[in-house]
Image (cartoon, grey):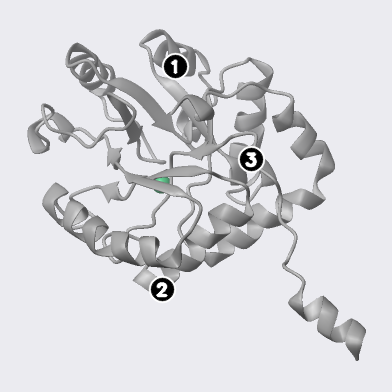
Amino acid sequence: MLFGLFKKNKPAAAADFSFLGTDMHSHMIPAVDDGSDSIETSLELLQGFVDLGYKKIITTPHTRPDYFPNTQADLRARFERLNPAIAQANLPLEVEMASEYFVDYEFLQQQDINNLLTFSGKHLLIELSTYQAPPNLFETIFQLKIKGYQLILAHPERYGYYASDFSQFEKLKDFGCQFQVNLLSLTGIYGKPPKELAMKFFKNNMVDFLGTDMHHAKHLESLKAMQHDGKLMRLIQGYEFLNASL
Ligand SMILES: [Fe+2]
């Protein structure tokens, strides 16, 4: 009986990502995209970041006009509404907000590239379609570079269309894009091809950041469960990331 009570009260163990310090990819702003749907859920997930050992997160709701009808003003307003709840919960976690910008063919027409949500200076998180890259991708990247943005490409391992032409990834690096691999890609949660591509980036020393891309409780549970994969944890602990510089 006592043993049962003890087990129940013991906090669930979780993988320790404190060596990363900062996470710069998640969806914690309530009801603006496919991430958290309420302030309560956000607080639970933010507590999850604490359990995983993070000290700071830069949450990055989607900016993707064809899927999510939000604006920069909406995102800021929702973040301001979440902030008092974070303060009240007294979480030992610094929380900032930027955005994850979906770069498609029309990006330069649809966005005011003088006014994008960045973090740690002019770091800008961008993502691409998982089906095909826009034909004007490198032109778009060039225009963003001219404006002084330091581009971070979210989950390049999910862009399988470049897997058979790996030089495209090298070209993205040559254009100054930093690569952010999703932690959960390494577990195979998005399938085998992204896992293999992620491993190839590691092998070629192309990974700059690791991100959670946390959307919901299932992601949190999968991240916590990474503690059981000692080999994987040793691989990432032996690699140098730039997360803590943010
Ligand atoms: Fe994301």
2 and 3 marks in contact (CB < 8 Å): no
N-terminal of the two: label 2 or label 3?
3
Where residue 33 sits: x, y (%)? 30, 59
Residue 33 appears left or right of 194: left
Residue 168 - label = 1
Where residue 131 sits: x, y (%)? 39, 40
Question: In terms of secondary structure, where does tag 3 sit?
Answer: loop
Residue 18 - label = 3
Q: 130 or 244, which lies in front?
A: 244
- The residue where tag 2 is placed is 40
Quadrant position of the N terminus in the picture: bottom right
Residue 36 - label = none
184 shown above or below 126? below
Distance from label 2 to label 3 (Cα)? 24 Å
Where residue 97 sits: x, y (%)? 31, 45
Mark 1 or 2: the one toward you: 2
1 and 2 marks in contact (CB < 8 Å): no
Three-letter amino acid code at the position of disc 2:
Glu
Three-letter amino acid code at the position of disc 3:
Ser
N-terminal of the two: label 1 or label 2?
2
Q: Quadrant of residue 25?
A: top left
* Residue furthest to the bottom: 1
104 shown above or below 144? below
Mark 1 or 3: the one toward you: 3
Residue 36 appears left or right of 11: left
